[in-house]
Amino acid sequence: VAAVGGRPVGDYVTSEHPSGALPIIAVPTTSGTGTEANPYAVLTDPNLKEKRALNRPPFTYPKASIVDPELTLSLPPRETAVTGMDVLFHALEAFVGKRCHPFVEAAAELAVRGVAKFLVRAVKDGGDREAREGMSLASTAAGMAINGGGTTALHGMEHPVSAHLNVAHAEGLCALSGPYLKYLAEVVPGKMARVAEWLGEERAAERAVVAVEELKEELGLNLRLRDLGVSEDMLETLVDDTLRVMGHNVANTPGEPDRGRIYEFFREAM
């Protein structure tokens, strides 16, 4: 619905339950969101400083998706790195989340192994067709993983960050991931050990944390929240928004971290 003539969008809404929608054809030009394989979209309200997920199946499922790695060849290195890390976190979160099931696990493994093998190559040489193909497959697999398993508190915490500040989504994910992954290594060590193995490391939970930190360092994404413009006086608001706007993500998180733990994630990421 588009607002014209200065009238609010709500004036044009005739039903809260649409019976149809125009078909969506998804043609990704990055290897990142994986939305060609799920019904998710994201809307940011700059006035409210809120970033919400839009999920209205069947209307927001693509009717067709065309995944052509050739369309990603011109993506610059920084954008390749940032969107590639989103792939990794999609897969990892879907796997550790409460909604995970065997099909989610299979898709997550395919995605994480693909990132481990191809992301750095794609960043270093954008014309590496094998790497671009590998990342396209990983992105779509991660999109399938979150279709079944959803994401967790990491995405829940990041959405308020990029709603308040003009930063790339996965920059926020990278900044927040350190303390969050350490938490996961404590509460789901078996799953994090599997992630470490998929990343080519020894099968131990702490190795997954180290491997992700090393990958961020190699990609120039070893960020802190303060690097993105977050100040200490913003933390309470970011925690509030995480629980209010993205509470469903927190509920899907193993151990269901409470407000105090969410605040500590933010504080430790500063």
Image (spheres, rainbow, N blue to C red):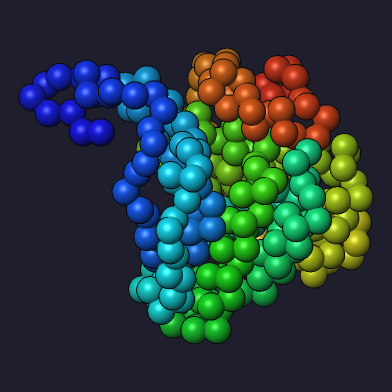
Left-right relation of 72 to 257: left
Quadrant location, the N terminus: top left
Q: Nearer the viewer, residue 73 or 21?
A: 21
**Image side of residue 203 versus residue 242, left or right:** right
Depth order, front residue of 216/82: 82
Where does the image place residue 41, in percent across and percent down from the top left? 45, 43
- Numbered marks: total: 0
| Residue 179 appears in view | no
Q: Position of residue 65 (x, y in %)?
A: 44, 65
What residue is shown at x 49% (from left), y 84% (from top)? 129
Relative to 175, is 244 above or below? above
User: From what the image shows, is residue 128 above or below residue 222?
Assistant: below
Please, is residue 43 above or below residue 96 in the view?
Answer: above
Any part of residue 61 in sight: yes
Q: Would you say 259 lies left or right of 239 here?
A: right
Position of the C terminus, as image quadrant, is top right
Query: Residue 139 lies in what quarter of the image?
Result: bottom right
Please give the name of the residue rendered at 37% of the width and 60% of the height, measured from the top-left corner.
25
Is residue 105 placed above or below 132 in the rendered structure? above
Residue sitting at the far left:
5
Q: How far from the left and from the top, in percent, is residue 35?
A: 49, 54
At a point 65% along the width and 32% down the height, the residue shown is 249
| Residue 174: % across, % down | 60, 47
Q: Quadrant of residue 204?
A: bottom right
> Residue at the spot x=62%, y=57% of the render?
144
